[in-house]
Amino acid sequence: TLNVFRGADPARWRTAVPRYAAVRYRDVYPGIDVLYHGTERRLAYDLLVAPGADPSRIAMTFEGAEGLALDEAGNLLVLVAGRSVRHQAPFAYQEIDGRRHEVASRFVLAGDGRVAIAVGEHDRARPLVIDPTLTYATFVGGSGYDVASAVAVDATGAVYVAGATTSADFPGTGTRTTNDLFDVFVTKLNPQGTAFVYTTILGGDDNDEALGIAVDAAGNAYVVGDTASPNFPTLNAFQPTFHGGDLSGIDAFVARLSPTGAPVFSTFLGGSGDDSAAAVAVAPTGPGGATQAFVTGYTTSPDFPVLHALQPAFGGAGTGTILPGDAFIVKLNANGTRVYATYLGGSDDDAGTGIAVDGAGSVYVTGITASTNFPTRGPLQPARAGATSNYDLFVAKLTATGRALVYSTYLGGSANEQGGGVAVDPLGRALLTGSSNSLDFPTANALQPANAGTLDTVVAMLAPDGASLVFSTYLGGEGIDFGLGVGFDSGGRIFVTGATTSTTFPVKLPLKATNNGNFDAYLTRLTPDGRGLVYSTYLGGDGADFSNAVAVAPSGVAYVVGATDGGGPPPLAPFPTTGGAAQPTFGGPPFDAFVAKIDPNTPPTITNPGDQVNREGDTVSLPISASDPDGDTLTFSATGLPDGLTIGAASGVITGTLTFNSAGVHTVTVTVSDGHGGSASTTFTWTVIDVVPTNRPPECTGATPSVATIWPPDHRQVTVAIQGVTDPDGDPVMITITRVLQDEPTNDNGDANTPVDGGGVGTAAAWVRAERSAQGDGRIYEIRFTATDGKGGTCAGSVKVAVPHTQNTPAIDSGVRYDSSTGAAAI
C-alpha cells in the first residue's frame, strides 16, 4: 500500500492507497489483451490472444531505445543509456484439457525500431498466451534527487529505509507534486528485497528530510529529521506548531508510523532557533515493557522544549568563537509525549549525531563539540584537544531518568573530528565511529594506529565506565574516509560504514576490491576486539556512491543505505545491482537512494563419504565430515536413508541397523546448515544387499494370562488367552494350547464334582472352571502352550491362573498336578 501525508490539511492525506498484483489492458490489438503481473520476483507481461485473433498484428516499440538486438538464445536486448535490458525469449502456449501445449514462438526484428513475435502453427479456435519475461536490477529512487540517510531491520529481516526525495515519481508513490523540494520518504522492503511493502511520504511546502529511523518489536517505525515546512503534517502532536529558525529556518520532527506505514503521531520538536534531529533509538523501557524513543540532534533555540532536564538552560549563548548550538536528548513515550528533554552542550557549537540505549534505559550519545566547557564527568579526555574553532568528538552516558551523567568525555586530536553513529553492546561498552584529520587522535589496541590520509574514519570502544578505551583505531587510506554508521551482531563483531575516495582503503575478502578515485561506499567488519579485519569492501560503481547508515541483524547480515549516481555509462562500471530487486532501473540523475543487503556468512563445507555398500541386518556407524569457516554450530539432516538408519542432527553420524526390507540402491543426500542461511549438501548412493534372514523363533518368556485371578468360585467357565508372546523378526505368532492342569483333583469335596474343570487343548485359548476345593487353600491352574511363527520357529511356555479359597487370601500352589480334562495325575 501507499501512504501520502503532505501538508497540514488532513483532507489531502491519503492512506492505504491500493497497489495491484496484475493489470490487464484489453484490446491493445483486436482480440489481444496485455496482462502485466509479477512472477518469480520479476515483472512479466503476457499477451492474451483470443480465439480467432491474429498474433501477427503484435508489434512493440521501445521509447528511448538506442538499439535492438537478439542474442543466441533468442532473447531481445534493448540498449538504453548505454546498458542492455534483456527480455527473455517468448514462451507461447495453449491450454488444452487442463494442460499447457507449447507453441513455437520467437522475437523478430521487423525494422523501423519495431519488434514482432512470430508464432508457429496452433489451434486458432483456442486462446493463445505469449509470455515474455523482463528481468531487472534495483535502485531506490525516481527522476529527481533521492538519498537514504537511515536504515533499520526487524526480526523478520524486513528493511525500513528513511531519507529525502525530490522525485515526483519516487517508486511506489505514483505521481505527485514536489516543486523540486525535498520530502521525507519511509520505505519498507520485504525480507528478500524484491518488493516494497509500503512507502510513506511526509512533507509540506518546503524542504523536509529524514535523518534517523528505528523500529520496535511490533514493526512501528520511529522517524526523525528536520523540516522547513510550516505545514508539515502533524498528528497527536505535543508540539503542533512550527517555530521556524533563525538561520536555516528548520524545526526537528519526530513521527511514529504504524506497521502499515500510517502515522500514529507526528510532532514538531524545537524552539525559535534552528533544530534538527539526527538519530533515534527505541527500547522497551516504558511501563510494562512499552516502547520508548530516544532522540538526539542539535538546536540553536534558547527556548527548546526541555522537561525534567539534566541541563535546563541553553549553553550556546553566543559567548564562543563560532556559531553557538547545543546537542539535545529527548525521551518520548510511544504516544509521542515527552518523558524528559534536555540540552547537552557548552558555550560554543555542539551537536548530537548518534544515540543508543541499553536494556536498563541508560542513553549513550555521541556527536561533536567545539566548546571548551562541554559538560564532562569522569572523563577519559577532560579537555578539548583541538585548536580554537576545531571540533572534537564527545561521548556521554546518561542515567535512565536523564537527570544525571554517568560519564561524559571529549575524544579527539589537535585537528578536526566529525561525528557519526554509536552503538552499545550487552556489557555496556559504547562503540562509536566518526572521522578525523588529526594525526594524534587517541588510539589504543589499534588495527591502524596512524592516519593514512587527509581524513580517516575512526572507530573507538569505551569501557563501561567511560574512563578508558577498549580499543581505538583509524580506518582509511590515502584519500578522504568518512565513518557514519556502526553496529554489532550477536557475536560482538563490529560493522562500520561510510564513504571513501581512498584507493588504499583496507580491504579483505571484498565484493569490490578497487576504487577508481571517486567516492565509494564501504562496509568493514571488525573482530570483537577491534584489532582484526573479518572483511572489508568497497561498494559502488565507477561513479559517486555514499553510505550513510548500517543496520545489523543478530546473524551478522548487514543492511547498508545511502546514495548513488548510478555509475556508468560504459566503459565505466554501473552501481552493482541484483536481479529480482524492488526497483529495476536507476531513476536519476542526479542521485538515487540505494539499499544493499550484505550477508557475510561463509557457508559450511561438507565431505562426501563415498558410495556405501552394506547387507540387510548390518549395524552402521558412518560419520559425515563438515566444517564451518565462521565457527558456526552446524546441524545435519538427511533424505533417502535406507530403513533403519538415522542421522544425528548435532553429530552428523549416520547410525542404525539396516532392516530386512531395505534392499536396493538408495540415493542419500546429507545437508549441513550453519543457522545463518548457509548450507552445503552432498549426495551418494547406499546399496543394501538383499539377505535371506536367519529366522529367529518367538519368545515365550514374557507370556501372561488374560485372566490371572478368578472370583467368585461359581463354577462358570472362564476363557483364558495367552498374552505377551513376541517375535524378534516381527513375524505373526500362532498360539496352541497343549495342556490344562490344576493342583487339586477334579472332584474334590466342595467343587461340585463337575467332570471336566478345564480344556481348550489344540486351540488358541484355554478355558478353566471357576471353582476350588472347600477344604483347600485355593486352586492353581497351569496352562501350557506352544507358539510358532510359521517359519519353523517355535517356543513353549506356561501361565498360571488362581482361584483363591477366600477373596482376600491368595491361592497357594501345592506343586502337584492333575489333568483338568481327565482328572488323571500329571507331571
Image: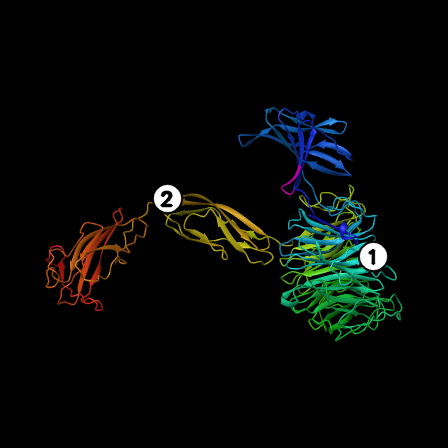
Q: Is residue 509 above or below residue 432?
A: above
Residue labelled with disc 1: 230
Nearer to me, 741 or 496: 741
Q: Secondary structure at mark 2?
A: loop
Give x and y (percent) for residue 206.
Answer: 83, 53
Q: Residue furthest front?
A: 11
Give x and y (percent) for residue 23.
Answer: 67, 38
Q: What amino acid is labelled 1 in the image?
A: Pro
Please say whether residue 392 is visible from this viewpoint. no
Give x and y (percent) for residue 146.
Answer: 78, 50
- Crowding around mark 1 (Cα neighbors within 10 Å: few <14, some 14 to 19, many 20+) is many
- Crowding around mark 2 (Cα neighbors within 10 Å: few <14, some 14 to 19, many 20+) is some
Please say whether residue 423 is visible from this viewpoint. yes
Taking the magenta stretch, the answer to whether it contains residue 801 is no
Q: Residue at x 37, y 45 (%)?
A: 661
Q: Is residue 144 above or below residue 808?
A: above
Q: Is residue 772 above or below residue 26?
A: below
Label placed on residue 690: 2
Question: For residue 60, which quarter of the picture?
Answer: top right
Q: Which residues are magenta?
A: 36-41
